[in-house]
Image (tube, grey):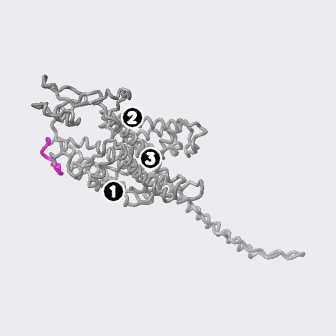
Amino acid sequence: RDNDFDYLEFRLWIGLWSAFQCLILVATDASFLVKYFTRFTEEGFSSLISFIFIYDAFKKMIKLADHYPINSQFKVDYITHYSCACKPLDPGKGVFIASPVCSLMETFPFLLQDNTTIDWAALTAKDCLKYGGQLVGNNCDYVPDITLMSFILFFGTYTCSMALKKFKTSRYFPTTARKLISDFAIILSILIFCGIDALVGVDTPKLIVPSEFKPTSPERGWFIPPFGGNPWWVYLAAAIPALLVTILIFMDQQITAVIVNRKEHKLKKGAGYHLDLFWVAILMIVCSFMGLPWYVAATVISIAHIDSLKMETETSAPGEQPKFLGVREQRVTGVIVFILTGVSVFMAPILKFIPMPVLYGVFLYMGVASLNGVQFMDRLKLLLMPLKHQPDFIYLRHVPLRRVHLFTFLQVVCLALLWILKSTVAAIIFPVMILALVAVRKAMDYLFSQHDLSFLDDVIPEKDKKKKEDEKKKKKKKGSMDSDNDDEKNHQHSLNATHRADTIPFLQSHAMPSPPRTPVKVVPQIRIELEPEDNGYFWRSKGTETTL
């Protein structure tokens, strides 16, 4: 703005450069770097996104409370003293009289020729300010009930969503009904509190949905021209901020894919790291030319999608917990979700009745729900939990508790630094700091043993791991061949011994003849070698992962 640059054109070239860099990453198979994205990096990034959801939900509610302040000095005995009236301006001065609520008066810099022709007492607050009046009274700065009702809707939606989500483990209603209620917990919560808001009748802020699909600014069309608005050197300089955008897109997209493809989800279909990044780059070009937002895989929404598709055993025995079977791997839900997102433009007459506090409650629920089952949160709870009440986690059996707390402390420090960096003017280097999480995890190899890291985190693959594995296989193959030769020699020796036993005449006893000796039966020797599986994430992900 200070240099009089065309922002949309500059953004277009940043998007084009970033898409080109993403295509280079695809062509060079750079997605193999996901093998260095261990649990430490995954949980740090996903926790940061979840905390952002939670923080923004409360931030929006606090902003709403500032816009609709509560009269904390209100007293019932002095109810007759509270008033707010519309008064004309002082005609003698011919200027506006300052008022805390009349900031909109600056929009109408004029005075009426004859103030007596207007019934000022009958005007609404907006009309009073529109026609150049002023609001006078000790109750003009406050809006009753809206803030309190908004917080009721906010916490009510969150609490109801959490309760209905856990309803499938309750004792009420048949199993099918409980499961159905649990699957549609968020929708039911929204409908319930939209109904409560309508019944109470308080004028809470509602969702604003555009009635047509068009650019926000009437000064531009659907296509952003790539030339003519900025100097030629700006097109080349855009490659520098595009590099930061590329790092952020790559990390956000691939970390989300790694979280979705965890072995705990028991996915069966193959992964698509390169293909996903390729289409992100192609669609980034389209969005840049149309002035639309860039997008990647959303971490919190992807985790919520996985949770909604989980399959469990149907148990009816009292006290028996259902076992996790896997995830329904299909594309139907994703297609329907995005179709309904587009159709929502035509649902504006219905969506405008949804209060904004209800949506903020949904954001809070999504942020909290995505933290469930994260090992980082479990280890945070251990800090405040006595030893005798600690759960039986597998890593507590093999790693000393003080080492567990040290690992958690380092993770908290990294998360706090990312949060502080995101909230300051240095946020432009935030993508680089996300990448620095991998370097921090690599440095932890010098602080923790591989044994401890194998339980607290994933072991980072070594550079020469493939070479070592090939040598190991060659040695095993050579040892197997030597063992087979030994087995053949032993087998031949047994046959020869049996043959000699048959040719030697049996000694006859004077008392009782001995029974003929049974020839020795040779049992074939079978050698079975079990090669231990590689538990590393990268090699496991080649055939057992899926992107939803």
Task: Compare residues 354 and 367 and report the one nearer the observer.
Answer: 354
In terms of sequence position, does the residue under pointer 1 or pointer 2 come before the other?
1
Q: Main secondary structure of the magenta part?
A: loop
Is residue 335 part of the magenta span, yes or no?
A: no
Residue behind mark 2: 417
Residue at 26% from the left image edge and 55% from the top image edge: 346
Q: Is residue 80 left or right of residue 329?
A: left
Mark number for residue 160?
3
> Could you give the CA–CA distance between mark 2 and mark 3, rounded to whole angstroms?
34 Å
Quadrant position of residue 87: top left
In terms of sequence position, does the residue under pointer 2 or pointer 3 come before the other?
3
Callout 1 amino acid: Leu
Residue at 46% from the left image edge and 39% from the top image edge: 444
Q: Is residue 343 left or right of residue 34?
A: left
Q: Secondary structure at mark 1?
A: helix
Callout 2 amino acid: Leu
**First to last magenta residue range:** 221-231
Residue behind mark 1: 275
Residue at the top extreme of this rendering: 92
Quadrant (top left, top right, bottom left, bottom right) of the C terminus: bottom left
Task: Compare residues 7 and 473 and report the one nearer the observer.
Answer: 7
Q: Position of residue 361 (x, y in %)?
A: 39, 44
Mark number for residue 245?
none
Circles 3 and 1, Cβ within 8 Å, touching? The answer is no
In terms of sequence position, does the residue under pointer 3 or pointer 1 come before the other?
3
Q: Position of residue 61 (x, y in %)?
A: 35, 38
In the rendered image, is residue 378 in sight?
Answer: yes
Callout 3 amino acid: Cys
Q: Secondary structure at mark 3?
A: helix
